[in-house]
Amino acid sequence: MNQSFNFQINNQFTLNLPADPLQEVFPRQVEGAAFSYVIPQKTQQPSLVSLNKPLALQLGFTAEDLSDDGIAEVLTGNKIIAGMQPYSMNYGGHQFGQWAGQLGDGRAINLGQIETEKKGLQTLQLKGAGKTPYSRHADGLAVLRSSIREYLCSEAMYHLGIPTTRALSLCLTGDKVNRDMFYDGNPQLELGAVVCRVSSSFMRFGSFQLPAMRGDKKLLKEMVDFSIEQNFPHLGEPCTEVYLKWYQEISEKTCQLIVEWMRVGFVHGVMNTDNMSIIGETIDYGPYGWIDAFDLTWTPNTTDAQGKRYSFGAQPEIGQWNLFQLGNAIYSLIDDAVPLNKILNDYATNYEQRWLKMMQAKLGLDDLDLDKQGLDELASEADAVLINRLEKLMMNTEIDMTMFYRVLSSLPKQTEPELTEPEQAELWQEHFRNCFYEEEKLADNYFEGFANWLNDYQQRLSKNNSSESERMQAMNAVNPKYVLRNYLAQQAIEKAEKGDYSMIEELLQVLQTPYTEQKSCEHFAEKRPAWAKNKAGCSMLSCSS
Ligand code: AMP
Ligand code: MG
C-alpha cells in the first residue's frame, strides 16, 4: 500500500478542547471533557462497496490514493493515516422529549480534521467503527442496510441543494453483526459496514446541553467559543452579544433547513437534540423517510408510531422545541432570557414567511409586485389560503407528493373555446391520474374539490408576470423529479445484501441531478408500488441499525 495521503491535517477540535484523560474503552460518564481518544476496531476483511470520488478529490485524496488497494483499510479505520488522532465526541440530548443525559458518539469515531481548498476544515468521521466510551450497552457497529441508507440519502440531500453531512465511502468490514431488526426477539447476523462521513462540524445541540446540565460552565463556554471561532467566525470575537448572534444564526439555519425538508418531503424521524447539527445540516440518517402519499401525520419511525412526535408536519415545531433546549443550555452565558425568547419567537414568524415563499415557488406563484400598501400582504394571505386548501385536499386524496408538483407544472391551460366544467374536470383527472394511489379517489365526487382548487389556482396563475414556460422551468427547479423513495433504497439494500451493488451506483447517478428529466431513469420517478405499501423498510423503519 502506498503511503501518500498527503492531507493537511489540522486537528483543531482536539487541540482546543479538553480531552478525557482516560484512553481505555469502557462505558462511562465522561465529565469535563469534549471528547475521548479512541482507536477504531480492527475488522476481518475491509472492502469498498462504494466511493464518492468527486468528494474524495475535493477533500484532497489523489487519484493514486483512490486506486490504492488499501483505501478500504483507511476508510474503515483499520489503518490510521499519520497525523490523525481518532476521537469520539461527548454530548447529551433530549430523546423523544426527555432529557437522556450523556449520549455521545457511541459508534462514531472522528479520524481528524483536514484542510481543504474550497470548504476549509473538514472532519472525517467513521460510523460503525467499534466501541467507544459512549457506547453504553451497545456494540459500536453498523450494518450494511442502515449504512446504505445513510450513504445514499446524504448524497441525495446534497444534490437537492439541502444542507447535509456528506458521505465519502461505504465499506463492508467483513464482520457479522447481530441485530434484532424488528425488536421481536429474533436477532439475525447481518453484514457489518462503515460509512465515512464528512462535515465542517459534527457538534450537536446536545454538545452544549451536556455541560450546561452538569453545571460545567467552563466547558460550556469553551465549546461555544470553539464553535464560533471554527464555524461562525464572521460573528466576531466571542462575547455575550456574539453568543446571542450565534444563537440567532443557528435558529435561522435550523428554520431554513426544516423549510427545505418540507419542500422535498423528507422526514428525519429522530429529531432528538443530539441529532440536531449546530451548523444547520441534516445529520444522523436513521429511520428517516420520504413522503410518498402526502400526509403531514406520517412518521417513518416505528418507535414514534404512537406519539408521532417526529411526523412530517411536526418537524417545524420540533425545530423550535429543540432550539428552546439549546437556548436553555446557553442561558448561563447570557443571563438574560428576553433576547433568547425573542429569537425563539422570531423562529415561528420566520418559519411562516419562509415556508410561504417556498410553497409559492413550488406552485409557481410569482411575487405580485403590488404597489399599493397593504395589498402585498393581502395577496400573500390569499396565497396562504390557497396553499392550505391544497394541503387539505392532498391529505384526503392520497396523492403522491413528488409526482403531483411535477405534474402540476405542466397543467394544461383552460382551452378556447371554453370547456364546460365537467369537461375541464375530466381533462384534469386524466392529467393527474398517475399521481393518485387510490383509483376511487379520482371519482367525480372526490375530484370535485380538486377541480375547484385547480380552477382557483389557474386564476391565480393568470396574475403572474412570467410566461408559462418560465413558470414551468421555475417550478421544476424546486420540485424534484427524483427523490430517494423508501422502496428504492430498500431495493438497493436487498440487492446489495446479495452482493450486487449496481443499484447503489444507479441511484447515486440519478440522484445527482434530481430536478432534471432523465429519460432512461423514468422508473426511478414512479410512485411507490402497491407491494411496498406496508413492507418493512419501505413504509416504516425501526431504529435498529
Ligand atoms: P441515534 O438516535 O441513532 O443517533 O443514537 C442515539 C445514541 O445511541 C447515540 O449516542 C449513538 O451514538 C448511540 N448508538 C446508536 N447505535 C449504537 C450502537 N450500535 N453502538 C453504540 N452506540 C450506539
Ligand atoms: Mg445520533
Image (cartoon, rainbow, N blue to C red):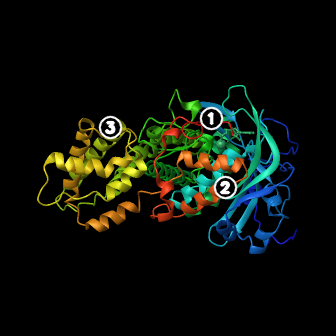
Residue drawn at x 59%, y 30% is 303
Q: Nearer the viewer, residue 320 or 391?
A: 391
Which structural element holds mark 2? helix
Q: Which mark lies nearer to you, 2 or 1?
A: 1
Q: Position of residue 507 (x, y in %)?
A: 58, 57
- Asked if disc 3 and disc 2 are in contact, CB closer than 8 Å, the reply is no
The residue under label 1 is 542
Q: Position of residue 498 (x, y in %)?
A: 72, 48
Q: Quadrant of residue 119?
A: bottom right
Image quarter for ligand 2 equals top right
Q: Position of residue 394 (x, y in %)?
A: 35, 41
Q: Earlier in the sequence, mark 3 or mark 2?
A: 2
Instruction: For marks 3 and 1, give the CA distance.
Output: 31 Å
Q: Quadrant of residue 209?
A: top right
- Please tell me whether residue 471 is drawn above or below residue 97 in the rendered image: below
Please give left or right for residue 206 compared with residue 137 in the image: left
Q: Earlier in the sequence, mark 3 or mark 1?
A: 3
Q: Earlier in the sequence, mark 2 or mark 1?
A: 2
Q: Amino acid at mark 3?
A: Lys
Q: Nearer the viewer, residue 42 or 525?
A: 525
Badge 1 local density, few (<14 within 10 Å), some, or many (20+)? many
Which structural element holds mark 1? loop
Q: Amino acid at mark 1?
A: Ser
Badge 3 local density, few (<14 within 10 Å), some, or many (20+)? some
- Please tell me whether residue 354 is drawn above or below residue 184 in the rendered image: below
In this rendering, does residue 455 appear at all? yes
The residue under label 3 is 441
Q: Nearer the viewer, residue 343 or 390?
A: 390
The residue under label 2 is 226
Q: Position of residue 227 (x, y in %)?
A: 63, 55
Instruction: For marks 2 and 1, give the CA distance.
Output: 35 Å
